[in-house]
Image (spheres, rainbow, N blue to C red):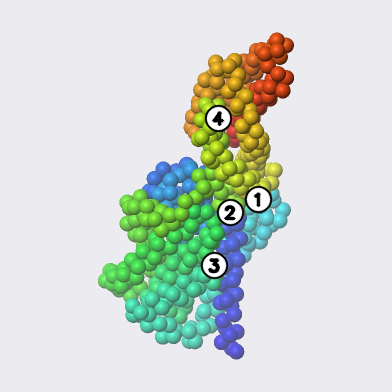
Amino acid sequence: MSHLLNLLPAIGGLGIFLLGMVIMTEGLHALAGPAMRRALKAFTRSPYSGAATGALCTAILQSSSATTVAAVGFVGAGLITFSGALGIIFGANIGTTITGWLVVLLGFKLKLGTVILPVIFFGALLKLFAQKRLASLGLSMAGFGLIFVGIAMMQQGMAGLENIITPAQFPPDSFTGRLKLLALGILITVVTQSSSAGVAAALTALYAGAVNFNQAAALVIGMDVGTTITALMATIGTARGARRTGWAHVVYNLLTAIAALLLLTPYTWVWEYYAPGQLQANGEIALVAFHTFFNGAGVILVLPFSEYFARLMMKIVPEAASPYTGQLDVSLLSEPSIALNAVFSSVKTQLTGLIEHIRRLLAEQTKLSVNDLGELHSALEQTRAFVDRIHLEQSSQAEWPKLLAMIHVLDHLHRLHQRCDEETLQIKSLAALHQLEAVRPQVLGRLNTFVQQLQHEQWHLAFEQARDLRIGLANQLEPVRNAIMMDIALGKVSVPRATEHMEALRWLQRIANHLARIAYHLSRLPAE
């Protein structure tokens, strides 16, 4: 019973540490998340720059999952390549080691557990009484303080167990023993859902003498592997990009873990050779340094082979995704700005496909026009359902107007689909109007230019093109209408047949109107 009472402060301290990490991450995410996402997108030009920005963003946000979700979203939206996203994922592993350094340098060396209490109080006041960024700053401060209160409690609890829990009670320092400790590290991370908490617990146990350096190192290696299992479980039922990312985590971290196990003995030899006795005296610093070393070495070794690694992941997760909705991953809904990027990419692809369908109809390539209309319609319904799950506050400066623009664009896309459902009769009537022979090439030419501008995201030029098409059609179709009326009067065409021709002209005008409205809303998207 007394042993259990001695253990309670350590368990409670771990819980407070976890709570502090969650609160601090939430605050930092609200405070710096949008800026970090912009940095990820702006600076990820290659796997190397992706690794640097991934490490920096993870170190600042203290959340590798937030960095990874951003990377998946950008790949889905076509903003960065998959190999570039791999660089971000690799770099995020380095960023997570910052937590260990905070624990050792500020928690163990400076012992901020008591000194930090006023910071928690001041942070709570900011959260309660300030607004927006100051409130997020207060939340970050409170979480930061709780981390060190948790560390202090874990130290206190482990100090009471120094004669109860000893290295002899753990698997011995053999290869088999290290594998068992690695498995234990995986289990700890899966249970706590935080490798940072596991690393902090391992550091505390090492500091208290409950485990020796090699045992703690094997635990930390296992905790790194454990994060990949958590990430992989989170991708179940999601889109291809998220599954590939999850498997990339697993494969990369397994390779890194194997390398770390092989490097552990040489690492201890180097310490003993150049700094005899320091591995025992400053084991916690040596452990964090080892954690940083094997993660950094893994990134340096794998970056030159990022393209090959990306191909491997594509072979492991080869299933085809819809070209129209493959980007719409439900895991992105927790990040509305990234989810909107995915919607934008999906809408651009769908609009291009629908315009191509209309262009083929007008060119009378009927055999090619009907193949994917059903898939396009299904993609539109999926996109509308996805947008319906994106929830924003009206105060969101960049995301709110983008969401409204997407809703308008989807509405006009829906109307375009309705027009295409009416196509058969209208196209036949248009084909019968010899007066349109001069108009048809001009319409097709403007549609081709519109598609090119759409693909290059030249929104204002696309709007001008669609607007000119609408105005031009209005001017060119009026004489055609007058000619049809004249033919009725002269008895050259029956009234029902003339009505079909008039409806066909209205169909063409409505197509141009919807394209112009879509281009208008796209041109008003806020710049990032």
Q: Distance of mark 2 from mark 3, alpha carbons?
A: 20 Å
Residue 330 got which mark? 2
Q: Are marks 2 and 1 in contact (CB under 8 Å)?
A: yes
User: Image check: 184 left or right of 440?
Assistant: left
Q: Distance of mark 3 from mark 4, alpha carbons?
A: 54 Å
Q: Distance of mark 4 from mark 2, alpha carbons?
A: 35 Å
Of badges 4 and 2, nearer the viewer stands 4
Q: Look at 70% across and 43% down and name the residue there.
A: 394
Residue 193 got which mark? 3
Q: What crowding class fits label 1: few (fewer than 14 Cα within 10 Å), some (14-19), or many (20 or more)?
A: few
Q: Residue 372: in sight, yes or no?
A: yes
Of 95 and 407, nearer the camera is: 407
Of badges 1 and 3, nearer the viewer stands 1
Q: What crowding class fits label 2: few (fewer than 14 Cα within 10 Å), some (14-19), or many (20 or more)?
A: some
Q: Look at 62% across and 34% down and name the residue there.
A: 420
Q: Position of residue 181 (x, y in %)?
A: 42, 77
Of labels 2 and 1, earlier in sequence is: 2
Q: Residue flagged by tag 2: what amino acid is it?
A: Val
Q: Look at 44% across and 67% down and name the residue there.
A: 225
Q: Distance of mark 4 from mark 1, alpha carbons?
A: 34 Å
Of labels 4 and 1, earlier in sequence is: 4
Question: Can you identify the residue that label 1 sits on?
Answer: 389
Residue 361 got which mark? 4
Q: Distance of mark 2 from mark 1, alpha carbons?
A: 9 Å
Q: Residue 109: in sight, yes or no?
A: no
Q: Residue flagged by tag 3: what amino acid is it?
A: Gln
Q: What crowding class fits label 4: few (fewer than 14 Cα within 10 Å), some (14-19), or many (20 or more)?
A: many
Of labels 1 and 3, earlier in sequence is: 3
